[in-house]
């Protein structure tokens, strides 16, 4: 058994700190893209790690620790959305600036980023989620399959279909 999973299951603070250091940036980027808000992503990231600590014994049996953590984050994001939808009627999507430009790094938005953000907004939810997990979180197709509970072939098909659809949408905008 992986020593880190045993340390996590035992509740060792150093192991959780190492897990956080290893995955927090990727998780946060995925959550920002998924939820449309840095503040909401902060909250869900915190809840993700609170849940991991509360249910730490389950970490011992995780086959792929990264995929397991992303699954927990995805589930927390879904719970957050459900709660938020009860509080507000309409959820806003990220602007192209928020989606593609890290805060304080760039003040000028590239036209391509705006077109891609517009294209992503036009994808079906299940296609957009696969693209977000692949592009923003850096997960492999196998890890996305673990996170989503879908067969890897389905994930790959959705990813290819999403990329094809984005390509078509971007070509249409050029005309």
Image (cartoon, rainbow, N blue to C red):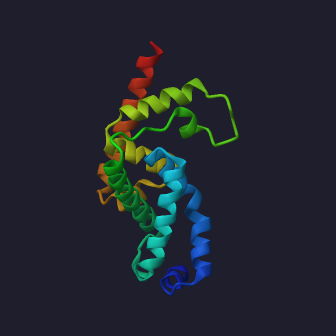
Identity of the residue furthest to the front in this view: 87
Res. 137 in view = no
Spot occupied by residue 8 in the image (x, y as percentages of width and height): 52, 81
**Looking at the picture, how far across and down is residue 86, in whole percent?**
31, 50
Q: Quadrant of residue 70?
A: bottom left
84 and 130: which one is in front? 84
**Viewer-proximal residue, 81 or 105?**
81
Q: Is residue 65 above or below residue 105?
A: below
Which picture quadrant has residue 78?
bottom left
Q: Residue furthest right?
A: 105
84 over 89 or under it: above or below: below
Number of numbered discs on residues: 0
Horizontal arrangement in the rendering, residue 100 relative to residue 47 (left or right): right
Residue at the extreme bottom? 10
Q: Nearer the viewer, residue 47 or 163?
A: 47
Please identify the quadrant where the C terminus is shown. Answer: top left
Q: Is residue 96 above or below residue 84?
A: above
Judged left or right of residue 104, residue 133 is left
Residue 81 appears anywhere in the view: yes
| Percent position of residue 76, x then y | 40, 61
Question: How far across and down, in percent of the image, does residue 46 sit?
Answer: 51, 64
Left or right, residue 16 beside residue 65 = right
């Amino acid at each position: 058994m992986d020593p880190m999973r045993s340390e996590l299951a035992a509740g060792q603070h150093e192991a959780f700190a190492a897990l956080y250091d290893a995955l927090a940036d990727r998780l946060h980027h995925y959550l920002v893209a998924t939820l449309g808000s840095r503040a909401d992503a902060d909250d869900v990231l915190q809840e993700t790690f609170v849940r991991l600590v509360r249910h730490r014994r389950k970490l011992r049996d995780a086959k792929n620790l990264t995929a397991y953590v992303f699954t927990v984050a995805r589930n927390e994001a879904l719970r957050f959305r459900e709660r938020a939808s009860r509080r507000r009627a309409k959820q806003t999507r990220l602007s192209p600036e928020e989606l593609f430009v890290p805060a304080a790094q760039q003040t000028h938005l590239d036209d391509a980023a705006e077109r891609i953000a517009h294209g992503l907004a036009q994808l079906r939810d299940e296609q957009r989620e696969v693209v977000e997990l692949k592009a923003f979180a850096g997960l492999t197709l196998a890890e996305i399959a673990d996170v989503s509970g879908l067969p890897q072939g389905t994930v790959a098909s959705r990813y290819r279909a999403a990329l094809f659809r984005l390509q078509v949408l971007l070509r249409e905008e050029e005309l």
